[in-house]
Amino acid sequence: MANEPLTILVTGGAGYVGAASADALIEAGHRVVILDDLSTGDSYLIPNAASSVTGSYVDRDRVGDLIRDARIDAVLHCAARSIVSDSMEKPERYYRDNLIGSLNLLDAVQNAGIRHFVFSSSAAVYGGAQSALIPEDSMTAPINPYGATKLAFEHALRSYAQAFDIQVLALRYFNVAGATERVSERHTPETHLLPRIVAAAQSGEPFTLFGADFPTPDGTALRDYVHIADVAAANAAAFAALQKGKIGSTFAAINIGSGTGTSVREAIGAVERASKLSVKIDQQPRRDGDPASLVANIDRAAKLLGWRPRQSDINRIARSLFSTS
Ligand code: UFG
């Protein structure tokens, strides 16, 4: 039987993950209210079927008013500062927004008696791989401030979930990539691998490859690229599982990835095949804070959410980048 429709507040709903997730929630029959300050999001990404408020999740009183006025039942917290290299240079911004700001949001949520909270966490909480496929109970030892702030907020969520009547799922996304019909990745500046390979392929400028001396099969770093549509579906599955009472604990961290490692060179190959263009490579030293390998064990997502990746093959991800542009 279908679940009752919820009214879900999506912070960062004008961003890449938030907008695609809002689409998936609407598709699942929920009402969506987007809260985004448009600092990095784009208003055109807000789905027509959603209502939206321009503002920041860090403003506790305003968020409290919004929750009450819009009769919010549940929260998907996607908004964050999210660039690893930027977090190395400006850690204060990451701690202020991703941690203190998120705590303000959480206080508003708790004061309002909201019972279901889904958090966009990150594989960056792990630091690097201790095993080929990382399960959720691996040691968390972030090696950059971005990952540290995501982990610190997970700790707060776990404590709140134990103390108050709120159930939390922290979805640890691996490398979100690709495009849906409506939503594609656009950051300024763009630091992420696939859009940078695409830009190099289209412009003919060389692509800068950071590090070819990692202890991996081809020397370039391994990541787990997961299609944005699969991430959006995982968020919808998270609310469905919470509504059905299927989680069995007040807090759970769940990896969302493809379960497959792809090297930077393999990603270049996938873009070349999808675009029929060739990519020139400018090999440079490793980037600060980059682990050699981050690949998910995704058994828990299957078990708790009934979710599995359906579109996350690297060739399919690469093709999705050209079918919308
Ligand atoms: N890379 C290059 N050249 C580039 C860009 C990236 O060689 O121009 C390499 C990086 O060095 C890294 C890999 O491609 O080895 C992936 O880099 P991204 O910047 O695309 O992604 P990251 O793995 O650094 O980080 C991303 C998100 C984080 C998230 C993390 C989780 O930015 O928010 O994935 O795995 F935490």
Image (cartoon, rainbow, N blue to C red):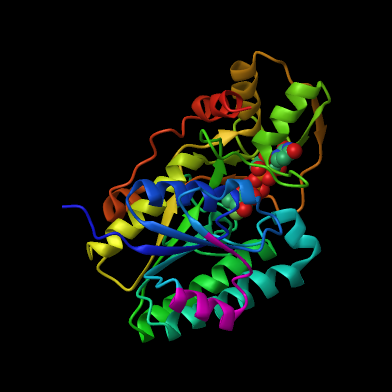
Residue 112 picture location, percent across and down: 42, 82
Q: Which residues are magenta?
A: 52-69
- Is residue 58 or residue 95 the one in the foreground? 58
In the figure, residue 178 lies in which quadrant? top right
In the figure, residue 196 lies in which quadrant? top right
Q: Where in the image, quadrant-wise, is ligand 1 located?
A: top right
Name of the residue lying farthest toward the top: 276
Q: Is residue 61 magenta?
A: yes
Residue sitting at x 62%, y 62%: 80
| Position of 235 relative to 182 (above/below) | below
Residue 162 picture location, percent across and down: 36, 82
Residue sitting at x 69%, y 28%: 198
| Position of 57 relative to 254 (above/below) | below
Residue 14 picture location, percent across and down: 59, 53
| Position of 15 relative to 242 (above/below) | above
Tell me if 304 is positioned left or right of 173 in this view.
left
Q: Can see residue 220? A: no
- Is residue 87 or residue 142 the one in the foreground? 87
Residue sitting at x 70%, y 15%: 277
Residue 89 picture location, percent across and down: 81, 62
- The C terminus sits in image quarter: top right
In the figure, residue 292 lies in which quadrant? top right
Q: Is residue 53 magenta?
A: yes
Numbered disc total: 0
Tell me if 38 is positioned left or right of 62 in this view.
right
Residue sitting at x 65%, y 34%: 194
Q: Can see residue 184? A: yes
